[in-house]
């Protein structure tokens, strides 16, 4: 498949390594992708108000670009993936949002949700396949005990995201297995880290993240991996357990770190 | 040409208060066909009916139009009056000038105008009425009860006691159903088996009842009074006549690893088994999927040990064909499997149980001998959390939209039983609302909360986390507005009541309508709660909707009474207002057959003589015993050949014309 790569703002600032290792890994895996020039911020927070059109527009521009390029939109950051996928769902299913957004954007052809949005992990699972990924691994991370941290943005709401089982997801565990490490399954892996409230309520983030880290340590995890820069920030507030981006370990396993 | 009498009723001031009776009566006299018009204070009274009879005699009337209350109220009364006056009872039309007019209008002038129009429409229709004669059909004096739980058993006993023969078809090897699995019943906490098993024995020993266990209904045809049914008696691999129920085969069977259905998979059973000690009939069944003899051809130990030579590995399914006058559906329910709710860890942690599994565990004859323990480590739990509404009151995507009705009460029962036996165990119950309407029900729940110190928490559980070998329950406490966590050793899920999974097929076989949740629909939600809209099919127990045991037994009795209403007749008098096909116009398109909700229309090839032009054609035929006169076919028919007697297309158009005439 051919992808239009949408990195998003955080991957160019705070989470440069998430982007850099992803690009290296894609090249190593021979993925056909290109980053488009003038992408805009997705907004980072999905607008809950149904009549909030302006906050959806930059996502729609990216989605429309993918349509024009006849490529699937590829994201890595959990927040970008979440916003893109939900806005795309809105424009496909809500005639009011579709009409207003198109009226504003004045596109040559109306955009009605034709593009497909993929997360990097979905590409690994559904396009490349974890079995095939194994064959590309030159430096298996044997013996490393890694906990997957999903957070909420990748999984919920389940009927829109259609990413994995919201209560018992397996995609990151399968990824960990593919790169030769041992996945540690712990109960809090899909619980919210609270980081959206980082500025308002530091204690909340601290407590929620603490629960996650404790749960993972208790089950024997030596490190965590995540796809979300914000979650990583929240989890790193407790420095008992290193938290990596999944692309970093992927690059390491593929020998391109 | 008809000679019509129009009779306008005052209904005291009910109609006369708003409608000018005199004006309606006078304008009725000018309507086509009307030879006599009169008014009276109460048309339905003795005096009013006498006036009608006299008018029929004096004026030689052929039809009667009564302008009064709703036909639902007194149509039957006036039909009887007509019959008493020597007219065909279907030569009566009612104009509803009370519910449809005087009761809902204030303005006398416009109410009078509307009453006049309604009167005209009734007379216009009456001008085209023809005498109708209801058909008759016979009644087979035998009832079929599908399902042998408490509902089916009670219905069968009631019908049998009234002197009619009943067959119970039960798909599992024993009758007893869900109630047999229960430990105690609410709100009296009496032993479920102790009150059920005598009824099971009564059913087995009753002269008028035949049990077909390990059997299913394969095919149903026919109609009320005369259903023919094929029952598949599945091969038990044990000869029912020879077996004396000694149980030697069960002891000897080397396979001990099949899941016990009766214990909800919490215990193991042999491949040849009876589901539980008090099973009726006490005849074992060979579970061919688990039996070594059937899997590899070796073994056969049960055959060798059997003193009466009852084991028969060659036994085949047997098809029994029977005629029945009525069919009672009592298919019951199954608890919804909570596996789809990953947040509750059901199937992942052995310490998460459904309520029915918990019920088995609390039972002295159950998998743990009545000892409460954690299946993960066989230790006694220190803290138990009950979660209500698992799958109930959810949105349609996630579960069942309805309240399962029994869970609040059985959870209170479970909580109390735990506290009674182990006062040191902490018991928490999460609820959305506690719903306990019923005799002595709320008192029961309050006893749990107040006297037994059960901790009721309003709120739902979001997640169970397996932490340090215990189950951390993460939930919200809505009254406190806080997120709370409770560390539990055992979690019990009060799962939704779900219609038995295979009833859809049965519903289709019976042409009995069902709702979106696979519960059978009643003919009227208030006034005909135990009858299916399909004539001759009755509903007993949870197959119609969630119910507790007393309600189930009450409904089972009611279904029996309704069934007896048919069985006790020698002939069934039909409703003559049914569909009729004009074979000359029918083009054989099947539109009517497809819309008929009762399966009353069939097609036949026959020779049609169209004014001397003879040819073979496929034409619709209405089965008069099945047709309920709903009229769906008359609307669907593109060639206009389907017509409803008493409500013909011409009559309805005449009414419309009369209403539109100014």
Image (cartoon, rainbow, N blue to C red):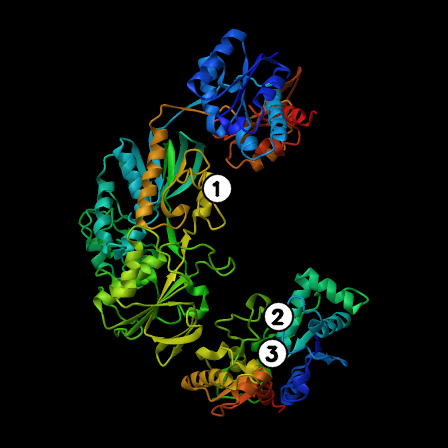
Assign the C terminus of chain B to one quadrant of the image: top right
SS class of the residue under badge 1? loop
User: Residue B652: horizontal and vertical position, in percent?
Assistant: 62, 26
**Residues at discs 2 and 1 both on one chain:** no
- How far apart are labels 2 and 1 at the CA level? 42 Å
Rounded to the nearest angstrom, the CA distance separating label 3 from label 1 is: 48 Å
Task: Examine the rendered structure and indicate whether residue B128 appears above or below residue B370.
Answer: above
- Can you tell which quarter of the image residue B469 is in? bottom left
Mark 1 burial class by Cα count in 10 Å: few <14, some 14-19, many 20+ = some
Q: Please state which of residues A250 and B354 is positioned toward the viewer in this rendering.
A: B354
Residue shown at the point (24%, 59%) measured from the top left: B253
Which subunit holds the residue at mark 1?
Answer: B
Dot 3: chain letter: A
Q: Which mark is on residue A78? A: 3
Residue in the image at 24% along x and 46% along y: B281
Q: Is residue B397 left or right of residue A109?
A: left
Residue A119 in picture, x, y percent from top left: 62, 76
**Apparent side of residue A257 relative to residue B446 in the rendered image (left or right):** right
Whole-percent x and y of residue B296?
A: 34, 59
Q: Name the subunit of mark 2.
A: A
Q: Which mark is residue A48?
A: 2
Q: Is residue B491 visible?
A: yes
Residue B148 in view of the camera: no
Label 3 vs 2, first from the N-terminus: 2
Question: The residue tagged with tag 3: helix, strand or loop?
Answer: helix
Where the N terminus of chain B falls, by quadrant? top right
Q: Nearer the viewer, residue B123 or B548?
A: B123
Question: Which residue was labeled with disc 1?
Answer: B513
Q: Quadrant of residue A226?
A: bottom right
- Neighbor class of circle 3 (other Cα within 10 Å; few <14, some 14-19, many 20+) is many
| Near-viewer residue (B558 or B3) | B3
The image position of residue B656, as x and y in percent, is 65, 27
């Amino acid at each position: 498949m051919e992808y239009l790569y949408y990195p998003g703002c955080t991957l160019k600032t705070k989470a440069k390594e998430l982007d850099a290792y992803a690009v290296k890994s894609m090249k190593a895996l021979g993925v056909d992708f290109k980053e488009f020039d003038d992408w805009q911020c997705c907004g980072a927070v999905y607008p809950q108000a149904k009549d909030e059109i302006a906050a959806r527009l930059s996502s729609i521009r990216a989605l429309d670009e993918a349509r024009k390029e006849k490529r699937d939109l590829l994201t890595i950051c959990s927040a970008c993936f979440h916003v893109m996928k939900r806005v795309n769902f809105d424009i496909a299913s809500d005639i009011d949002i579709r009409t207003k957004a198109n009226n504003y954007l004045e596109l040559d052809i109306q955009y009605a949700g034709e593009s497909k949005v993929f997360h990097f992990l979905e590409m690994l699972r559904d396009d490349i396949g974890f079995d095939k990924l194994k064959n590309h691994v030159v430096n298996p991370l044997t013996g490393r005990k890694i906990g997957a941290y999903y957070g909420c943005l990748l999984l919920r709401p389940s009927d829109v995201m259609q990413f994995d089982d919201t209560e018992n997801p397996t995609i990151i565990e399968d990824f960990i297995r593919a790169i030769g490490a041992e996945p540690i399954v712990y109960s809090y892996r899909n619980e919210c880290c609270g980081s959206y409230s980082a500025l308002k309520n530091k204690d909340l983030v601290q407590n929620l993240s603490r629960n996650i880290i404790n749960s993972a340590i208790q089950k024997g995890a030596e490190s965590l991996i995540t796809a979300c820069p914000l979650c990583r920030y929240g989890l790193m507030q407790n420095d008992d357990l290193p938290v990596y981006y999944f692309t970093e370990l992927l690059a390491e396993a593929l020998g391109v770190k | 040409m008809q000679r019509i009498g129009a009779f306008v009723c005052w209904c005291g001031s009910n109609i006369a208060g708003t409608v000018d009776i005199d004006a309606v009566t006078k304008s009725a006299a000018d309507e086509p066909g009307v030879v006599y018009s009169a008014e009276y204070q109460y048309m339905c009274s003795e005096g009013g009916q006498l006036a009608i009879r006299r008018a029929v005699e004096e004026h030689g009337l052929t039809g009667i139009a009564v302008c009064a209350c709703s036909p639902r109220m007194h149509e039957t009364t006036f039909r009887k009056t007509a019959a008493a006056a020597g007219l065909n009872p279907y030569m009566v039309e009612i104009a509803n000038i009370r519910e449809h007019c005087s009761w809902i209008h204030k303005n006398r002038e416009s109410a009078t105008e509307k009453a006049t129009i309604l009167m005209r429409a009734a007379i216009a229709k009456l001008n085209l009425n023809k005498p109708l004669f209801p058909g008759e059909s016979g009644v087979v004096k035998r009832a079929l009860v599908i399902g042998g739980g408490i509902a089916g058993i009670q219905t069968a006993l009631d019908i049998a006691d009234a002197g009619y023969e009943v067959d119970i078809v039960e798909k599992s090897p024993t009758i007893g159903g869900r109630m047999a699995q229960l430990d105690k019943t609410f709100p009296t906490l009496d032993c479920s088996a102790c009150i059920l098993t005598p009824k099971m024995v009564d059913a087995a020993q009753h002269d008028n009842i035949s049990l077909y266990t390990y059997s299913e209904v394969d095919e149903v045809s026919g109609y009320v009074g005369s259903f023919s049914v094929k029952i598949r008696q599945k091969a038990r691999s044990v000869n029912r006549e020879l077996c004396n129920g000694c149980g030697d085969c069960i002891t000897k069977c080397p396979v001990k690893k099949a899941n016990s259905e009766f214990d909800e998979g919490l215990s193991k059973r042999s491949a040849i088994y009876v589901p539980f000690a008090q099973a009726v009939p006490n005849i074992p069944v060979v579970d061919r999927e688990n039996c070594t003899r059937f899997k590899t051809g070796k073994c056969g130990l049960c055959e060798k040990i059997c003193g009466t030579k009852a084991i028969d590995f060659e036994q085949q399914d047997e098809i029994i064909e029977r005629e029945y006058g009525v069919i009672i559906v009592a298919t019951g329910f199954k608890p919804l499997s909570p596996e789809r709710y990953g947040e509750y860890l059901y199937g992942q942690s052995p310490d998460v149980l459904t309520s029915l599994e918990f019920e088995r565990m609390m039972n002295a004859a159950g998998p743990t001998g009545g000892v409460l323990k954690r299946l993960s480590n066989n230790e006694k739990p220190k803290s138990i959390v009950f979660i209500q509404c698992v799958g109930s009151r959810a949105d349609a995507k996630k579960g069942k939209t309805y309240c399962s009705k029994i869970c609040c009460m059985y959870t209170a029962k479970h909580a109390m039983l735990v506290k009674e036996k182990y006062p040191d165990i902490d018991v928490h119950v999460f609820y959305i609302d506690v719903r306990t309407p019923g005799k002595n029900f709320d008192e029961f729940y309050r006893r749990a909360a107040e006297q037994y110190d059960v901790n009721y928490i309003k709120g739902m559980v979001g997640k169970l986390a397996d932490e340090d070998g215990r189950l951390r329950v993460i939930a919200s406490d809505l009254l406190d507005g806080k997120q709370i966590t409770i560390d539990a050793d055992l979690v019990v899920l009060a799962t939704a009541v779900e219609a038995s999974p295979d009833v859809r097929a049965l519903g289709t076989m019976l042409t009995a309508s069902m709702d979106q949740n696979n519960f059978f629909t009643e003919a009227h939600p208030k006034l005909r709660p135990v009858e299916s809209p399909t004539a001759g099919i009755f509903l007993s127990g949870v197959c119609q909707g969630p119910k507790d045991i007393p309600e189930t037994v009450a409904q089972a009795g009611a279904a029996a009474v309704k069934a007896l209403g048919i069985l006790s007749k020698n002939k069934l008098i039909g409703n003559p207002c049914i569909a009729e096909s004009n074979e000359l116009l029918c083009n054989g398109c099947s539109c009517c057959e497809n819309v008929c909700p009762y399966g009353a229309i069939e097609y036949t090839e026959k020779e049609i003589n169209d004014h001397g032009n003879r040819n073979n054609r496929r034409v619709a035929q209405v089965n008069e015993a099945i047709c309920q006169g709903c009229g769906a076919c008359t609307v669907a028919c593109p060639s206009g050949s389907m017509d409803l007697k008493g409500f013909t297309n011409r009559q309805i158009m005449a009414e419309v014309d009369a209403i539109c005439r100014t």
